[in-house]
Every structure is written in structure tokens, then in C-alpha cells.
Image (cartoon, helix red, strand yellow):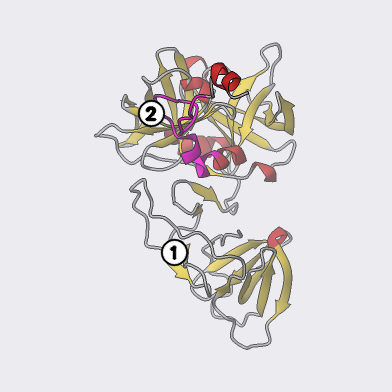
Amino acid sequence: MWKAILCVTSLCAGCALPAATVELKDKASVSGKILAEKPNEIVIDIGYTVLVIPRDQILNLAADSEAQAKTHVTQFSPSPVAVAPDKTGMTRPAPLTISSPGSADLPILPASVPSRAPDVQGFYSLSTGTAKERSVRELAAELGAAVMQVRTPAGLGSGFFINEDGFLITNFHVTEGETQISIEVFQQKNGELERNIYKQVKIVALNKFGDLALLKVEDKDAPKFAHVLLGDSDALAVGERVFAIGSPLGLERSVTEGIISTKTRQLQGELYLQTTAQINPGNSGGPLFNMRGEVVGVTNMKITSGEGLGFAIPVEAVTFFLKHRDSYAYDNDNPSAGYRYLPPPSRSHRVSAQ
């Protein structure tokens, strides 16, 4: 289902603007005033907010004969699933709603949150793709507090927070077979970096075959954490600059820069991002950022016999894992999934049935 992506802007305030109706590929339509037409997107004012619509989602754009643009979205596809309350207890601004005949109200964040478009549960934040590119120096200083070192009795790796309530992503192989997990975070306090260690870390979900793990900090004195935005690895171009933050060989807050060598490196039946950014043991589970500060991958391996041959799990695999995290829910009795299965019939039962 197409999702509205919000953007705060003051384009053409108070001036006469052309009204139009945008027909979308999922049989929905949006009517409003066109603020800007760009090669890859259209900016449209629907009255109480502004939408940025990717052109690859647009079926047709027609001028509206009415003087005033309509200010509603009509949904013709089957009724969407009602939005569930945020199970994480996160406090967010009260959502605006747009009504669709015969369907539930769809949540739209108010314009006070310009850079984030959360999923239906508000569990993590997706980038709108409108941020400007900046230097590694600026981004590393801003994002470093959202990246942590993940420790277990067997070793260490890296990870990153996806929301302020302490939920974090790392690799499955970092936590494999371990339940005693702690994290080390460097947080800004009074203009200085302060090292904090949290030892009450719960395993929430595991995807062994996707090499992903979802953890949660449960220390009573844990603050609200800095967190990252998830981007779009499909939008990457070969040769585009990226950088990683992690703890290679335990050297926390290490930053390495490189480019995307290829977006579709096939290894063991899975597709990975290949990068020249240096990836070493201890980087596993850490974020790979683009130059807008969006996570585009999760670093998880390298070819040890060469240099500049690092690999990362595309961020689309992360969002799929998070959306379906209930299916990967961790259970001490069955850590591979959230469900327990009955044992198969024994051989003696099969013989007697013949």
C-alpha cells in the first residue's frame, strides 16, 4: 500500500498554485495544489500538510478543473489493517488522520516531524529521502551516539538503535548461543562523551538465516537513546560514497569510509551490498550509512584474503525483519522461532498404520 511521505516546506506560500489530481498505482488518488515538479518526485499541498510523491508510484497526473483543490485521499483498494497502538510505549505527537470511505482512518504524522515517516506501528523510522548530503565528519559526530558495542562472553560486535526506547539491531552471529549480553554506548553529556554500559539486554527476535537480531535494553536507569533513520539501499548507485561505524577488534567508535562496489553481490544464496569501507571482526552488526546519514545496510562479513572487500545486509532485509518480528520472536525453548512445533510421528507409528 502506498504511504504518504511528509515534508515541511513553505514553497509558494500565499501564491496561486495549479490544482491537480494524482492517480496512484495502488488505485488511490490525491487531490491538491502542485508546489513543485521534480524529475523523480512531485510535491503537492493537500491543505493541512504537504506530500512528496515518488514518480514511480504515480499512474497519471491530471489538472483539476475546480478552483479549489480537494483536500482528501480516497482509497479504493481493500480496507487497510487498523493501526495498532505502539507496543513499545514510545511517546509521539498525536497523529492527524485522513478519512477513506469504507476504511479505517490512516495515521499521518503532523508537520512538526519533517524528517521521519514511521511504519504503521511507529516502531522504527524511515527516512523521507529529502535530507541533504553532508560530510563524514559531520555525520559521524551526529550519529555516533546511536551506535554501540555489543558484548557477549564469546566475543563482541556492533549494533545500532532503531528507536529511543532501546531497541537495537545487530547480527545473529554476534549473539548466537548467548543470552548474557551487554552493550557499551558513548553518550553526549555536558558537551563531553560519557561511556555507559547496560547489562540488562533482552533478545526480542532472531533471524538465523538473515543474520539479524533484535535486542532491547531493559536497565531501569536507561535514558532515551539516540537512534538512526532507515534508508533505501535500492536507491544507491555503484560508486556512491558510504561509511561504517563500529567496533573493529574492539576499537569502539571507529569510522571507515568507502564506496559501493556493487549492490547485488550473490553469496550463499543471498544478495549483499559490497563496499570498500573497511569491515573487520567487531564491525559485525554495525550500520553502513549513506552520505545523508541513513542506514542502507548492516555490516556482517568480509573476505579475509583481500582488502576492501566488505559486505553488508541491505536495509530492506532489516525492515522486513522488523515488520514481521513476531514471526521471529525469541523463545528460550525454541530460539529459532517464536513458535514451538510438535514432534513428527515416530517410525513405529508409521509402520503400524500400513
Q: Residues within 10 Å of mark 2 (few under 14, many from 20)?
A: many
**Residue 286: x %, y % from top left:** 52, 29
Q: Which mark is residue 185?
A: 2
Q: Amino acid at mark 2?
A: Val
Give the main secondary structure of the magenta stretch. Answer: loop
Residue closest to the eye, 119 or 69: 119
For the residue labelled by badge 1, is the local secondary structure a helix, a strand or a loop? loop
Distance, label 2 to label 1, CA atoms, is 31 Å
Q: Report which quarter residue 288 is drawn in.
A: top right
Identify the residue under disc 1.
110
| Disc with the residue nearer the chain's start (2 vs 1) | 1
Q: Residue at x 52, y 76 (%)?
A: 47
Q: Report which quarter residue 46 is drawn in.
A: bottom right
Q: Is residue 18 above or below residue 228?
A: below
Taking the magenta stretch, the answer to whether it contains residue 206 is no
**Residue 117: x %, y % from top left:** 51, 54
Q: Residue at x 61, y 46 (%)?
A: 133
* Residue 273 visible somewhere in the drawing: yes
Q: Is residue 307 above or below residue 99?
A: above
